[in-house]
Amino acid sequence: MIPHPQKRDIIPLKGSAAVKNAIRNLLLTSFHERPFNSTLGANLRGLLFEPADAITELALEDNIKRVLKKEPRIKTTEVEVVDLADQNSYRISVKFLIKQFDSSSSIEIVLRRLR
């Protein structure tokens, strides 16, 4: 983070960067992390240590789609979950349309299992 040169305060994100940051926060939030909204989040870490099979991939995809429906600034177009078994991780790619700017964008997150 780069501080503002005159105010010496953090510069807030605006536009598509703010939307991408909000999506990343939603995806990485687990259930019961937010005090007054315990069901908000994708709970991806909870599914990370389940067996690496097609059922877990579908559960990850369903959780992602469910939580992204709660973000009013976007329309989700595609969610892809790829199991990287040799690296003990999942690669998650989300493509979405930002309604305000009428532009498409994407975000990619790699979830790793550390043992």
Image (cartoon, grey):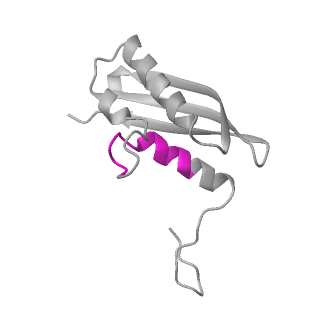
Residue at the bottom extreme of this rendering: 6
Asked if residue 111 lies left or right of residue 74, the reply is left
Q: Residue 25 magenta-drawn?
A: yes
Q: Which residues are magenta?
A: 21-34
Residue at image x 35%, y 21%?
85
Q: Position of residue 15 (x, y in %)?
A: 69, 56
Q: Position of residue 108 (x, y in %)?
A: 53, 37
Residue at the left extreme of this rendering: 115
Residue at image x 43%, y 25%?
60
Asked if residue 65 lies left or right of residue 84, the reply is right
Q: Position of residue 89 (x, y in %)?
A: 36, 29
Q: Residue 29 magenta-drawn?
A: yes
Residue at the right extreme of this rendering: 102
Q: What is the quadrant of residue 23 in the picture?
A: top right
79 to 101, vertically: above or below = above
* 114 or 61, nearer to the observer: 61
Q: Position of residue 94 (x, y in %)?
A: 58, 33
Name the image quarter holding the C terminus. top left
Residue at image x 33%, y 27%?
47
Q: What is the quadrant of residue 4 in the picture?
A: bottom right
* 95 or 110, nearer to the observer: 95
Residue at the top extreme of this rendering: 54
Number of numbered discs on residues: 0
Asked if residue 53 lies left or right of residue 91, the reply is left
6 to 18, vertically: above or below = below
